[in-house]
Each structure stands twice: as C-alpha cells, then as structure tokens.
Amino acid sequence: MKILCVNAGSSSLKFALYEMPECEKKADGTFEKIGLMGSFYTITKDEEKIVKQVSLPTHKEAVEILLEELVNLNIVSDINEIEGIGHRIVHGGDKYSASCIVDDKVLNDIKDLSELAPLHNPAHYVAIKCVMDMLPNVKNVVVFDTAYHQTMDEASYLYAVPYEWYEKYKIRKYGFHGTSHKYIANRVSEILDNKNLKIISCHLGNGASITAIKDGKCIDTSMGFTPAAGLVMGSRSGDIDVSFIPYLMNKTGYDINQVASDLNKKSGILGISGVSSDFRDIVNGRADGNEKCALAMEMFARRVIMYISYYNTLLGGADVICFAGGIGEKSVEARELIMEKLYPLGITFNNEKNLIRGEEVEISGSTSKIKCYVVPTNEELMIVKDTYNLIH
Ligand code: ADP
C-alpha cells in the first residue's frame, strides 16, 4: 500500500511516499521558499535528485506540481495507486489528542484553529482541500503536533495568570513539533541503547522549539498556547513582554490583529535583520558584513541557550542535547554559535564533525559532560505509520 505524507510548513512543503507496511521510502522531496523569492523544489527517487526553480506563490501550486511529478517521474504509474495521505497538523487545540481520519468536521476544526496557528493551519487546510479535490477516493489522516506534549504537568503548562482563564478559555501551553520531538527522543534512545534518558531536543527550523524529555515523555516545551512563543524564529518573535502591546497600540494606532500579525509574520530574524526570514540569507548576510544579520543570529543563539540552560536544570542534568530541523541539521554556523556558548555546562565541541550537514553525527567533544548530536528528524515516517494504522 502506498502512503503519501504531506508536511505543509509555513514556507515549505515536504513530502515522502512510502510503501507500507514495509516502511520503504519510494521518494521524497521539498518545495521551498513558498511565497518568497527564489522558490524551488527537489525530488529524490532511487538516490537520483532533481532540482527545479519554479514559481510557488502558495501551497496549492506545490501540491499540484507534486502530484503531476509523481506520475511524470514514474514514482507511481497512476496517481490512484496512492491509498492514503497523512498530513502533519500543527494545532489540534484541546480537541485532538490522537491522529484521526479527515471528515468535514475535522477539516472545519483545522480551519477554525487557524487563529491559534496563523502560519501553519491555513497551509494544512489548503493542502488537504487540494488533495481531496484531486484525489477524491483517497483517505486523508491528520497527525497533530500538540499530542506529544500532553504529558506536561500543570506547573509546566499553566501560565501564571488568573486560573479561571485556563478553566474557562483553555488558555495554557500546548506545545508544538511534538511528532518531531518524539521521533528525536526515540532515535536517541536507539543510538545510545537507553530508554531512560534526559534529553533536550532542539527542533530549529523556520518555526523552532526546544523540549525537555525524561524517559521518553515531554516535561516542558518552549512553544506555548500558539507556536509564537519561545525561541526567536524565522518571522515570529518568540517570548516577549506582553505589556509593550498596549503601549505600541497607543503610539501607532495599530489594532490588536495588526500587532498579532506583525509578531507572527514580521518579527524574528526577519524583523531584526530586515533581510529575510530564511536562515541561509542571514548567514550569508553576516558573512558579507551585515551587522543586523549578525545581531539576528546572536539573538537567535542566546534564546536557544536560555532554554537549554533552563531545561538542563529542570531535568536535573541532561544526558543528551539534540539538534534537528532545517537550521539544526544544516546550519554549521548556527550550531557553532550555540555550542560555543554552552561551555559553562561542561560541553565541549568537535569543530570538524560540526562541518557535516544533514546527517546523524555526534558534534560534542570526547570530554563533553553532555553528549550533543545532530539527529535529522523524520516526522514523515511517524505520520505514515499512523496513517497506515488508521486506514488499512
Ligand atoms: P519549516 O518546516 O518550519 O518551514 P524547516 O525545518 O524546513 O522549517 O527549516 C527551514 C530553515 O532551515 C530556514 O530558515 C532555512 O534557511 C534553514 N536552512 C535550510 N538549509 C540550510 C543550510 N544549509 N544552512 C543554513 N540554514 C538552512
């Protein structure tokens, strides 16, 4: 049975096609810089990789090109060979604690929850609607990023605000990237052959979060009620002092929607650098002497070490720190900046190993008190397994 996984991120759409139950990957690829200049896609099949520059104004064009290319490249002989599609969904609110098959209610819930994840849920909705239109007989399954974080206790998931805001309005930390953090925790346990580890999992992509994990369970995580909390991200601010919001509104006349939109879409490394939300552009800008790009990278790294330091204490001393996501897996410069700041935790750094991009590798030195690994995440495989289990 062929299962397609669709992971529509804020500025990218990743896919993987698997033969199940063998878990054999037939093809995968990424559509990148969606809605930005210089968009392109890559598709890999049998270790042969094609790269094409193409205009991708929205996720709809990415889905259309993907389904065409699967046939054109003989990855499937007929598009109807695909029997199930699993979609990664960022926000399930308090409605979803497990994966499920898509029906009209689920689709509407995903759309309604867009106010909690304005960069992601609209992209998921477009991607699901598009495949439902093009492949009406295929079963669609949704896998929520919020599910893994349900093991947090009240002290971690509550905000120190009137308790009734939680009781009446469910205002609490939900956490995101759960499928990725779960994969990373499982993979590290396999690498070190130990299920009882204290892990700090750093998923650093356009959206970024850090999770403290003990014995395979989430203890705390940096994203919150929405994915806007925690780290400095591509275009999201991360943690801020909310009291500057009324001050800003008084000064500018902005309404609350404008402020919320700017905190999600015009902040982060984009807001500081004024150059781009894409980390590659910031790295290149810094190399060319752009001081704002250097500042954005420094702010990004400082927020990362703030969470690593806190979670190291919360866990009573971490055994492992892992880096994943586009930046965590591939940005040598970001890892260098972060790792060199972590020496007070007894962490040493292997410069040579750190030059490796996109592969599983230990980047800590032999004397490091905490082992540090790059663990390329595989949300797709976890999503495909859930999809197969629900539809076959
Ligand atoms: P999302 O899924 O949230 O859109 P990704 O995990 O795909 O994000 O990560 C995208 C980020 O990874 C972008 O900021 C991009 O610039 C960065 N990235 C990808 N490849 C590299 C690289 N070789 N060097 C530095 N950053 C990279």
Image (cartoon, helix red, strand yellow):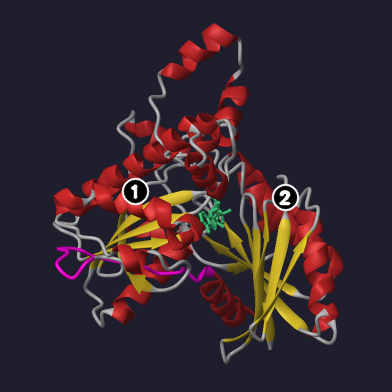
Residue identifier under label 1: 337
Query: Residue 104's spot in the image, x, y percent?
Result: 74, 58
Q: Quadrant of ligand 1?
A: bottom right
Residue at horizontal 33 percent and vertical 67 percent from the top: 352
Residue identifier under label 2: 38
Q: Work out how far the residue at label 1 is from the one at label 2, CA to CA, in angstroms.
A: 27 Å
Q: Which mark is residue 176?
A: none
Q: Residues within 10 Å of mark 2 (few under 14, many from 20)?
A: few
Query: Residue 379's spot in the image, x, y percent?
Result: 52, 69
- Report the span colored magenta: 365-379
Is the residue marked 1 within 8 Å of ligand 1, measured from its CB? no
User: Is 34 left or right of 379, judged from the image as shown?
Assistant: right
Residue at horizontal 50 percent and vertical 53 percent from the top: 205
* Mark 1, secondary structure of its residue: helix
Residue furthest toward the front? Answer: 288
Residue 4: quadrant of the picture: bottom right
User: Is 73 left or right of 224, judged from the image as shown?
Assistant: right
* Mark 2, secondary structure of its residue: loop
Residue 298's place in the image compared with 162, above or below, is below
Residue 270's place in the image compared with 391, above or below, is above
Is most of the magenta stretch helix, strand or loop? loop
